[in-house]
Amino acid sequence: GNNRAELERAIENVDPQQREGLSFLLLHMPEYDLKNLKADFLISNIKLAYRAREKANWKIPDDVFFNDVLPYANIDEPRDPWRKKFFEMCWPIVQECKTPTEAAQKLNQTIFGELSVKYSTARKRANQSPQESIDQGLASCTGLSIILTDACRSVGVPARLAGIPSWKNKRGNHTWVEIWDQGWHFTGAAEYNPQGLNRTWFQGDAALADPQSKLHSIYAVSFRKTNI
C-alpha cells in the first residue's frame, strides 16, 4: 500500500549485517504494521536490539534472538519506540549479570518502582503500551508483563508474554512473562520472588490448565507466525 516506500527504504538502509533481522520482522509482522511502521522506527529497533545482544554477558541462538529479543511489540499494543529509553534505564542494572535469569530477576525487582507503575483495574485498558502504562502509573497484568518483557528485550534477555484466557476454575484470566535461559522459565511481572524463577502465586491454577480446551489452555506469544 502507501507504506511500500518506507519498507523499501528500510531494506536499502539497514546495516547489511542486520538485514536478516529486518527480513524476519517483515516476513512475520502483522499487516497493520506493514502498512504503518516507518523505516526509521524499524532500523532503530533493529540496531538497538543487535547492540544489546553484543553487550550482554550471555549467548542466545539466532532463532531465539529473532523471535524473543528483536520484536518491537508483543501483541496489539501501540507501537512505542521503547527500546532506547529502556536500555538506558536497564543496562546499568544488569551490566554485571552473567545469565538471562539473573538479569530478569534484577529487572523485575527494580524497574516497576523506578517507573512508578503498579497493578490496577483502574487502568484505561488491558493492552497498554509501556508508555501508556508509565503515563498512568497503572497497568493490568498484561500491561505489567509488556513492560517487563520489553525491559528484558532491551538488554538482550529473551522474553515473551504467556497467559491463559480463563482459569479452569473460571475465576478470571492472567498474563505473565516467560524468560529464556537455556529453556523457558516463568515469572509474574512486578512480582519478584527472591527464590528465583518458576515460583509464583498462580502455579496451582496453571497446573489445572486443559490443553484440549482453547479457553483453558496456556499460550505463549510468538512474533513468528504459527498455526494458532
Image (cartoon, rainbow, N blue to C red):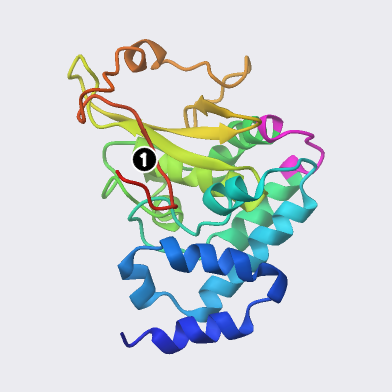
Residue found at the very far top of the displayed protein: 204
Name the residue: 31% across, 45% down: 227
Which x, y percent locates residue 79?
Answer: 41, 64
Horizontal relation, residue 31 to residue 223: left or right: left
Horizontal relation, residue 37 to residue 32: left or right: right
Screen quadrant of the C terminus: top left
Name the residue: 53% across, 39% down: 112
Which x, y percent locates residue 217?
Answer: 28, 26
Q: Quadrant of residue 84?
A: bottom right
- Residue type of the residue flagged with mark 1: Thr
Asked whether 180 or 79 is in front, the reply is 180
Q: Quadrant of residue 47?
A: bottom right
Query: Which residue matches tag 1?
Result: 142
Asked whether 105 or 210 is in front, the reply is 210
Q: Does 34 appear in magenta?
A: no
Screen quadrant of the N terminus: bottom left
- Seen in the picture, residue 127 relative to 105 is either above or below; the reply is below
Which element carries disc 1, helix, strand or loop? Answer: helix
Which x, y percent locates residue 146?
Answer: 44, 45
Query: What range is drawn magenta here?
Result: 93-102
Q: Quadrant of residue 173?
A: top left
